[in-house]
Amino acid sequence: MLVLGAGAFFTAATGFFPIRKAGFIIKSTFGRIFKNKSAFAATATALGATVGTGNIIGVASAVAIGGPGAVLWMWVGAFLGMMLKFAEAALAVKYKGGADIYIQKAFGGKSISVLWCVCCVLASFGGGNMVQTYSAGAAFKNAFGFSSAAVGAAIALLTAAVIFFGAKAVTRTSAAIVPVMACFYVIGCFAVLFICRQNIVPALKSIFYSAFEPIAIGGGTGGLLLSDALKTGITRGTFTHEAGMGSAAFAHAESEETDPLRQGCWGIVEVFTDTIFVCTLTALVILSAGSGAFSENSAAEIFRSFFGGAGDIFLCVSMFLFALAAVIGWAFYGEKALLGITKSKKIIVLYRILFCFAAFCGSFAAPGFIWNFTDIFNALMMFPNLAAIIILAPEVLRITNKPLLFGKGLLYQKQKTER
């Protein structure tokens, strides 16, 4: 709820910036994609870390646990999360560093920043690593009987081949992988939706009906169903887009963009692409083509039923690419966070080795353990990060050229940057 509250504050305080300035956002991102390739590369790294296996397995699990209504709450969380990602990306450019830098600025010291960095390093082993390799390994094992450990080893080796060459190698690799994997998965989803096009409207209706049906029914059971839909939709949505955690600020800080406003717009695009677009496609495939008995394997079962062995290959390749991009992105985040604690080169090399080993181990680890590990440290990252961007709210609002909407009010000079 803290994420929703902070997101609602920034969304309202900036006059619903994602809607009000939609044209400017598109012009400042896709309209300048060839003018400032580093901004896109930074966003690709952030997208690679967020558009992971959670966009397939996580969405399927959300629908299985919370029903179709969980998708609506996923949308709500994503919409409010857009301005949180905007704030993280914009502050990263303004202060020329990741969340650890603007947390120091907000609190006037390093203690809270170091605490956040510790949580980020630990979180990099969970949702950004072991969860990804476990999901990819399970997909190959279920489809072809492959050893999940072999899949984990392949991801670990490919990750090592990238991260030992430094930050530039990470951003270049992400810029190459992310568009390909996204297009590959999107084409497959559109193929299923075209075949089941008559079920798309009923699927959309079920999302809205299921989200609010418990209120109409009333009573304890209805309240419980609403709670499951809301809680699951928000938590799984947050896991995919990561708004509020501050992790993506490391990627955005690598951009050569000097205007915080423009880079902040890439943060909005990042959340929209990850959750509103990719996660929604997964949800529509499950709801339009599924049997109604939902599980975390629903997407795999649907692609298999429509395309046979080719469907298994499609989903496994998608899961592998999603997992690889996420692991590479989070290796970069974890290393940057570790640099906020120590500058020791030996510690950095040790981290890289342990991170790759964890990627291998995650492929056959107990899923309950790694999910609990992920949820704990993701949540611990959010508290200091959200506190920092709320403290720095005047700076964020100045970037959007909007006065603060409480207290005596602050008048900001109009920025000279092109709007």
Image (spheres, rainbow, N blue to C red):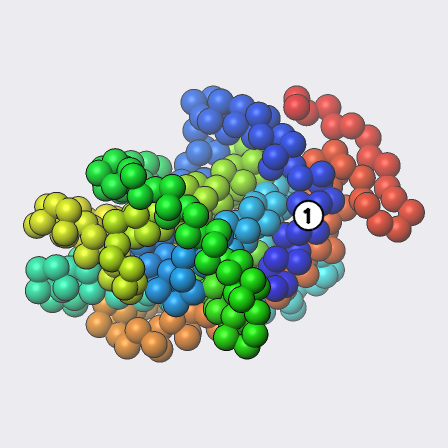
Image point (43%, 29%), residue name: 37
Image point (13%, 64%), residue name: 141
Q: x, y percentage for residue 16? A: 67, 39
Helix, strand or loop under label 1: helix
Q: Which residue position holds label 1?
A: 10
Q: Is 83 situated left or right of 255 in this image?
A: right
Q: Is 177 situated left or right of 18 in this image?
A: left
Nearest the eye: 395 or 31: 31
Nearest the eye: 49 or 315: 315
Q: x, y percentage for residue 355? A: 33, 64
Q: In which quarter of the image is residue 175?
A: top left
Q: Which amino acid does label 1 sit on?
A: Phe
Can residue 218 be seen here? The reply is yes
Say if 376 sits above or below 413 in the image.
below
Can residue 167 be seen here? The reply is no
Nearest the eye: 408 or 111: 408
The N terminus lies in quadrant: bottom right
Say if 86 sits above or below 155 in the image.
above
Nearest the eye: 208 or 230: 208
Image point (30%, 73%), residue name: 367
Q: Quadrant of residue 349?
A: bottom left
